[in-house]
């Protein structure tokens, strides 16, 4: 079989078949009557719930996405500045790394109520919480990318008379781009999850808030539909990111003459 | 007229002397080869000449000016081609102009007419990963040329190439060197390469490394110098010096 056909089978057909099996098993479990329908709706009921409440789900999606993107932008900016400082100054490199690791050992669910307490119920605490969960992969990814730059490449740039800023711009930053995109994949999923969690502890809108409301109303079908929507949303964002990555990192895609 | 004068240069690394009292000079328009066994300090010497490394003793004069520790004074091509994988060949080649602050479009226009002369016409929009070893080497050499300095330092410029491509590159290098009136100091491990390309050969040896001997290569009028008796004699002489 041709390599391309095999690629399609492994990348599309196999995952689709596994997902199909998952839904089939779920449907069979529900239809067997072993689990009460009120606790676990069937996939069919879940899809129906999604379409019947799609206007509500979309309204709350807008709020969650605003929080996620706002926080992600903050996380990227913070991660970028920290990585830059760690690359430029040895003192920052050794000083920041343990602090960065410590920030990641605090569970989001623990810190979220505190942030709400300090900043209130509007969008600001959500953005801060998302930024706190997303800056770490970016900072570490970029910092490693800068550090992995071939020292001979830096020597060559120095021999050309390039200063530190030019070495950073022409060599280190592009060299760190693959790491940046890998970090972005992690941060993007963290951003959505972070926004949803931040809404659980105090919000007036958003998908996290909507899930809690539906849970309290025992509308598990809508709750499940919203959860699947969140998964789909994360996957869509990852797809967009992968497309941007392919457009930006073009040099990896070229074939040898 | 002397372009480069190296006076009594000595370098140490963690208390160990790498090279000691190295002195030589390079005339304008000359091609000089630095040959020696591995670890004798050739690359260290090149790093000193390019300003990347500061010697513990000695001076490096370029057109009479002491350039010890000053980068951006010579055109330096490292052992590997060091093309930036994320830039197209035209952007790699025009990098010296970009570093000087020239906008990308103008830098590309500056290098554009030279692609044919350097034998890589049509590769402008390609990435280094798409080129063969020989073409990458030409691109790296072209970039080194656009540093725009009088002296070119080439650290084993053809070592990564296969034998056929090497022969091709030697002929090409001799031609372009004449066309552009280049002054080159290059490192080589190949006796044949040293004899084919250079006007003079500096043989390095010992620990710490010193210049053991200087050989002036007189090619004569024969069409193919490599088949002459003189070539064989030079080769024998070099071999015995390197084995000492």
Image: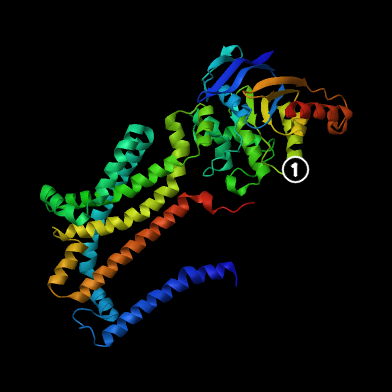
Q: Quadrant of the N terminus of chain A?
A: bottom right
| In the depicted structure, whether residue A84 falls above or below residue A179 | above
Q: Is A166 left, or right, of A29 in this rendering?
A: right
Give the number of callouts.
Answer: 1
Q: Which of B94 and B234 is in front in this view?
A: B234
Give percent across and percent down for residue A36. 20, 83
Q: Residue at position x 61%, y 35% from top?
A: B79
Q: How is the image coloured?
A: rainbow
Asked whether residue B72 is in view, the answer is no
Q: Residue at position x 28%, y 44% from top?
A: A100
Indicate the quadrant where residue B152 lies: top right
Give percent across and percent down for residue A43. 29, 79
Indicate the quadrant where residue A200 lies: bottom left
According to the image, label 1 marks what residue? B163
Circle 1 Cα neighbour tier, 10 Å, few/some/many (<14 / 14–19 / ≥20): few
Give percent across and percent down for residue B236. 82, 29
Give percent across and percent down for residue A69. 28, 53
Say which element carries label 1.
helix
Q: Residue at position x 58%, y 26% from top?
A: B44
| In the depicted structure, whether residue A75 falls above or below residue B27 | below
Q: Is B180 left, or right, of B112 in this rendering?
A: right
| In the depicted structure, whether residue B84 falls above or below residue A188 | above
Q: Which chain carries label 1?
A: B
Residue at the bottom extreme of this rendering: A32
Asked whether residue B163 is in view, the answer is yes
| In the depicted structure, whether residue A24 falls above or below residue A95 | below
Q: Which of A97 and B175 is in front in this view?
A: A97
């Amino acid at each position: 079989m041709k390599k391309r056909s095999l690629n399609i089978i492994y990348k599309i057909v196999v995952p689709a078949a596994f997902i199909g099996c998952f839904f089939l098993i779920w449907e069979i479990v529900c239809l067997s009557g072993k689990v009460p329908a009120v606790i676990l709706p069937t996939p069919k009921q879940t899809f129906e719930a999604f379409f019947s409440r799609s206007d509500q789900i979309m309204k709350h999606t807008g709020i969650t996405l605003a929080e996620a993107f706002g926080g992600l932008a903050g996380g990227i900016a913070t991660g970028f500045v920290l990585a830059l400082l760690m690359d430029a100054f040895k003192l920052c490199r050794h000083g920041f790394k343990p602090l960065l690791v410590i920030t990641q050992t605090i569970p989001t669910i623990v810190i979220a109520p505190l942030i709400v307490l300090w900043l209130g119920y509007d969008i600001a605490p959500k953005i801060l919480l998302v930024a706190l969960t997303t800056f770490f992969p970016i900072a570490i990814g970029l910092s490693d990318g800068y550090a992995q730059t071939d020292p001979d490449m830096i020597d060559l740039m120095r021999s050309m008379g390039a200063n530190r800023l030019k070495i950073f711009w022409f060599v280190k930053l592009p060299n760190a781009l693959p790491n940046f995109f890998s970090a972005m994949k992690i941060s993007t999923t963290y951003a959505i999850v972070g926004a949803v969690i931040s809404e659980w502890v105090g919000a007036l809108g958003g998908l996290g808030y909507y899930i809690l409301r539906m849970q309290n109303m025992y509308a598990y079908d809508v709750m499940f539909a919203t959860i699947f929507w969140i998964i789909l949303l994360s996957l869509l964002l990852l797809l967009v990111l992968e497309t941007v990555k392919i457009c930006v990192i073009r040099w990896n895609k070229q074939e040898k003459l | 007229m002397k372009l480069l004068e190296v006076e009594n240069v000595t370098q140490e690394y963690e208390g160990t002397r790498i090279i000691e009292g190295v002195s030589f000079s390079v005339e304008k328009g000359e091609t000089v080869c630095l040959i020696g066994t591995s670890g004798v300090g050739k690359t260290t010497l090149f790093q000193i000449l390019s300003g990347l490394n500061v010697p513990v003793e000695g001076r490096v004069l370029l057109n009479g000016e002491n350039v010890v520790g000053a980068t951006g004074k010579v055109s330096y091509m490292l052992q590997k081609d060091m093309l930036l994988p994320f830039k197209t060949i035209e952007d790699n080649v025009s990098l010296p102009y970009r570093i000087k602050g020239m906008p990308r479009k103008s830098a590309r226009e500056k290098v554009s007419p030279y692609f044919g002369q350097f034998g890589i016409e049509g590769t402008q929009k390609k990435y280094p990963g798409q080129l063969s070893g020989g073409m990458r080497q030409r691109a790296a050499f072209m970039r080194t040329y656009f540093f725009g300095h009088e002296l070119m330092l080439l650290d084993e410029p053809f070592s990564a190439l296969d034998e056929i491509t090497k022969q091709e590159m030697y002929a090409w290098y001799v031609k372009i060197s004449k066309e552009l009136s280049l002054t080159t100091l290059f490192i080589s491990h190949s006796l044949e390469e040293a004899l084919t390309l250079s006007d003079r050969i500096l043989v390095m040896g010992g620990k710490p490394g010193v210049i053991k001997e200087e050989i002036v290569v007189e090619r004569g009028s024969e069409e193919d110098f490599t088949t002459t008796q003189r070539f064989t004699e030079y080769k024998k002489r070099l071999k015995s010096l390197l084995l000492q």
